[in-house]
Image: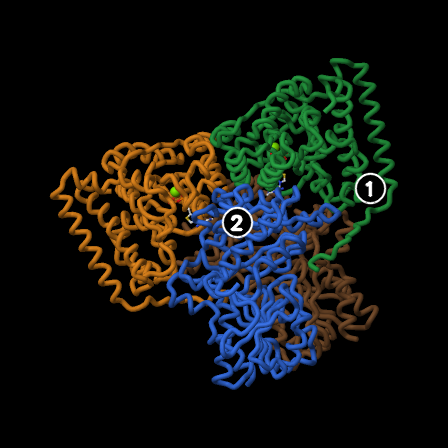
Chain colours: A brown, B blue, C orange, D green
Amino acid sequence: MAGERVVEALNRGLHDLLGRDPGTLLLGEDVLDPYGGAFRATKGLSTRFPDQVLSTPISENGIVGVANGLALAGHRVLVEVMFGDFLLLAFDQIVNFAAKSVSMYGRRVPLRTVVRCPVGGGRGYGPTHSQNPQKHLIGVPHLALAEMSAFHDPRHVLADLLDRGDPAVFFEDKILYTQPARGEGRIDQLWAAELPAGPLGPAVLTMGRPESTDCLIICPGGVADRAMRAGAELLLRHELETQIIVPSRLWPFDAKPVLDAAGRAAVVCVVEDGPAGGGWGAAVAHELHTALWGQLSRPVVTVAAEPEVIPAAPHLEETVRVGPAKIVTAVWEATR
Amino acid sequence: MAGERVVEALNRGLHDLLGRDPGTLLLGEDVLDPYGGAFRATKGLSTRFPDQVLSTPISENGIVGVANGLALAGHRVLVEVMFGDFLLLAFDQIVNFAAKSVSMYGRRVPLRTVVRCPVGGGRGYGPTHSQNPQKHLIGVPHLALAEMSAFHDPRHVLADLLDRGDPAVFFEDKILYTQPARGEGRIDQLWAAELPAGPLGPAVLTMGRPESTDCLIICPGGVADRAMRAGAELLLRHELETQIIVPSRLWPFDAKPVLDAAGRAAVVCVVEDGPAGGGWGAAVAHELHTALWGQLSRPVVTVAAEPEVIPAAPHLEETVRVGPAKIVTAVWEATR
Amino acid sequence: MTAPTLDDDLDSLLLIRHFEQRLLDLFAAGELNGTTHTCLGQEHVPVALSPLLAEDDFVLSNHRGHGHYLARYDDPAGLLAEIMGRRGGVCDGVGGSQHLFRDGYLSTGVQGESLPVGVGIALSLRRRKPGSVVVAYIGDGTWGEGAVYEALNMAALWRAPMIVVVEHNGIAQTTPTEAHLAGTIGGRCAGFGIRHRLVEGNDVTAIRAALAPAISLVRTSGEPLVVEFRTHRLGPHSKGDDTRSEQELEAARRADWYPRLAAAAPESFAAADGRQRDRVAAVVDDVRARPASEWRRQWPANE
Amino acid sequence: MTAPTLDDDLDSLLLIRHFEQRLLDLFAAGELNGTTHTCLGQEHVPVALSPLLAEDDFVLSNHRGHGHYLARYDDPAGLLAEIMGRRGGVCDGVGGSQHLFRDGYLSTGVQGESLPVGVGIALSLRRRKPGSVVVAYIGDGTWGEGAVYEALNMAALWRAPMIVVVEHNGIAQTTPTEAHLAGTIGGRCAGFGIRHRLVEGNDVTAIRAALAPAISLVRTSGEPLVVEFRTHRLGPHSKGDDTRSEQELEAARRADWYPRLAAAAPESFAAADGRQRDRVAAVVDDVRARPASEWRRQWPANE
Ligand SMILES: Cc1ncc(C[n+]2csc(CCOP(=O)(O)OP(=O)(O)O)c2C)c(N)n1
Ligand SMILES: Cc1ncc(C[n+]2csc(CCOP(=O)(O)OP(=O)(O)O)c2C)c(N)n1
Ligand SMILES: [Mg+2]
Ligand SMILES: [Mg+2]
């Protein structure tokens, strides 16, 4: 909707989802009105759907466990974990119970538990409230991962995650909450967004001429804004034209829709805003190397955060998080 | 020592480590004599070092937390988690407390917590007792990961992990426990092992002529035996000569000692016994692609377990775990 | 919920006893893989409880769950096939001894994981099948896990109709309760404002009579309940790993229901005993002859 | 452990009060980033406790920890510089408000994480510095975390000299205690066989006198102790996020020590109040003028 911020789009999506099915429940810490959650994503829900919203004690593992029980009994369940760092407290319920239960009983046991959590730095919250924990959960059988973006309507993405019968985690970059929800169309003078494969497919951000791409950046929603700034810089300073692909689904990662563009680009760059190693960047790069061997003129460039905690002070945060400059440097160096 | 099994070498190592420093402590469930731990790795310790061994309640997160407290107070602490799957219960203490504390207070706070856990299938224990959880912890800043092998003396590896001041996790493939501790030297008619970079460097397994390698397999200790069987098969059936490199340290992964061999081999294959995606295999492959671009004649082949739980029945386990045949097929298909 | 007769109870007790003993034999003979935790000495717990449960109730079991399963479903062949990885297993051999699932029944092997799950199921039952309850079995050692307390807190706050059945056998693997549990289970329940009932002995009829009103109250009030059975593990933790002294084992044997019931009615007991022994033998023969199970994966993982 | 005078206590209370109030001002003025949890209304807790602690004791603090820090270390500039990310911060701005570390003091932002860590430190102290204790501050809401119970169990089993100080302010972020905590904190401690002391009111001298023997007993016996302070959060959870009614806020204000002490000795109070206000103002001016902190990373991560 026009003028919406991302957190409002998210909130609207949650309203829709609780509204379409009275069996859909939402649990989390401090999610009741008038507060509506630490980042206000659940605002209005408890007033409108008092029987479907449950405010919980501070018990991340327990809450996800309760959600798993409800899901086992046939409910669709959304859990809000207040900060992505605290997801680690719930890994047993996410990995050992939710994901394994789908298949370990010999037949498919659908489990519709979707855990949402704000992730990433840039807000000065300090090292235990700023991590990007995506990497820990990539490649868990029967666990789907998606990341919020300004281009994808959270309603569609969450509905898909809730409906598929595999448990899922939805990562929400904190910085995005207050940014405009863009959807498709023109973003600014330089950039325009398209969703060529529909509301769940990757968003494609172009400068107008997707055919003649010098650089293809693949990144999740939380990094897209920084990638666009890097793209602008690459154009201005180095006359390189960039295309950006922003998948909503991080895992299982579908490489098909990016192969064409990746095969054509002079530089392919995968960006993730967490420390490198065993994460999304290397996983995507490996798929591309394998699928496009002989077609790529240089190795896929991966850009990641420094291998460090996210410090509290904003000027220090910027030394660790991925910023446009780091992307620009990595791409530029690859071309030389 | 001659005739030792791996679990005996591990046990001897633990004896040595508790013996060399009375401040080194060991915690875990059921670690007391006469039992000495579910896999008997801690046998004799509580009798010999009654003040250094603590048998705990069933509280994985709590135990690692206690270890972290002891480590903060200056102790070296070994924790035994009974099955690697249960490590997920302790991820908050491992990642958010131990690893972050090393650097989040602005100066280095050394934390000598080493968590050991048996991992992997092949024993029919079922889906909650068979996972390889390594992938979840790769690329965590200030967290070291190592894996037990038949070629590395666990004493040296654990001593190094305990001494470096970063917390660490040591993965022990269950199947290895009862296999012979081999160290350096001849393994069988085909294979011989060397530790050219010393007791902590990777083990290099060759058929005698490392120069003329058709295939280089890089794999952790738990997979080495299967890799050797695959190598034998590749020689017999396809006349391909294989070299195997078995690093002890999984992460941070040091690519240097493998670059030479990888650059010379016709096929480079990285094997891990867990589901693919965001794991060690892709991380290593990405490093090699980047470092050896132009030198590699084909993409690095990664072999992983099927993306599934490890089922209980032995004949089903084999459909998911990595076996020699899967390695052989992957390598052979890559050469064609 | 038709009332079982004394004979039904005895059959059920003996079926479980012989099933578990045969499992240990099969292990010793190298015919089984992995691990198995028998409930020898604790059979009366699920036998007493099962007739108090209705079809819509949900049972959450743990690693020591064969008795929980057999007392609820008269299906030794399905269970044995599961454990042996043969055709006809409850979960086609994927789950094995510790991971069973049927409508209204689930077990898993991670201690403590089931209690928050149980709260969730109980909350759903209260909405959709009021009057139904969740029964979750855990051991004394499992009270070491934090998940237990997160669950108790939420169960009490939200009035989740869940009955936590504690099989307090005085030991966790090799660790005696004194070494792993401070205070008491009853005291811990009180701290969360949760009712707690202690059950001693193994007289199935008496236990059932004593518990029936408390369990009814869970159905009507929705308030959770903890029932703590003081019981004895007769066998090893899994197979052959018993570190207890002969004296401790002797105490466990003295508390066993088997010699007590055998002495009480020697003839009918012997008849029932033979019947169940033979039944289990036939089940073993049947299952042993079956081909390996097939995992009918109808779904692609991570599609 | 030299006994503080009434004036020392008042200075300490007022230093914390003015520090926290200025933080909220700085936030409102956009001069601070991130989040901050002030201890307004709870200042007396660490002020009462700190003189009972010795240098070798270890304090574990939480998100609401400025008072814990200032009552132990007379270092408002170090703390403010840390929060503002300026030169001279306790942790060079890496940790920020919730993550402080000095010898014998550590805070972290994940609720419940500190208690098992506290058990470990306490066990080490018992070995190496007998008579020393760990003091771990947590809030009422933190009793939702399973880690708390895993730690209490081990502390009791192993006699870890740890004092858990509960700042029970009746709320967790926006959730009133009735909605997040079943039963009582005292009852939960009893369930683990752990001594529990309830403290009401905010008379620092009286509290200290009442607690001194119990704390000494921890030093000599090694047995853990839980001290529960009934207290009131005067301010928002962090900044501007207070959802309580005017009535609730009024009740918190009525319980505040500030007007009580101001009325009790108007002149000396006013003098102290002015002194601390000025001191904090000077600290703010000093820190604000400092350059940004530098992160002197002397180690390569993951080398
Ligand atoms: C989280 C977790 N930690 C450890 C284990 C290993 N384990 C299996 S059974 C058991 C002992 C359980 O003791 P208790 O709860 O008393 O049940 P009992 O075996 O006596 O029936 C342990 C430690 C486990 N299955 N799960
Ligand atoms: C594991 C974890 N979950 C959630 C939070 C977010 N959080 C920070 S403070 C807080 C409330 C804590 O309440 P309480 O323990 O009563 O302390 P108080 O804020 O009242 O001092 C919450 C939910 C957190 N920091 N850690
Ligand atoms: Mg037990
Ligand atoms: Mg509170």
Q: Position of residue B128 (x, y in %)?
A: 45, 56
Q: Is residue C215 above or below residue A23?
A: above
Q: Position of residue A64 (x, y in %)?
A: 51, 48
Q: Is residue D216 above or below residue A142?
A: above
Q: Is residue B118 visible?
A: yes
Q: Position of residue B283 (x, y in %)?
A: 62, 67
Q: Is residue D153 above or below residue A318?
A: above
Which is nearer the eye, A242 or A195? Answer: A242
Q: Which mark is residue B89?
A: 2
Which is nearer the eye, A21 or C301? Answer: C301
Where in the image, quadrant-wise, is ligand 2 located?
top right
Work out which quarter of the rendered image holds the N terminus of chain A and state it.
bottom right
Q: Is mark 2 within 8 Å of ligand 1?
A: yes
State yes or no: discs 1 and 2 in contact (Cβ < 8 Å). no
Instruction: Write down the chain letter for disc 1.
Output: D
Q: Residue at x 59, y 62 (%)?
A: A250
Q: What type is the residue that disc 1 sits on?
A: Gly
Left or right: A190 as drawn, with respect to D241: right
Q: Quadrant of residue A225?
A: bottom right
Q: What type is the residue that disc 2 sits on?
A: Leu
Q: Is residue A36 visible?
A: no
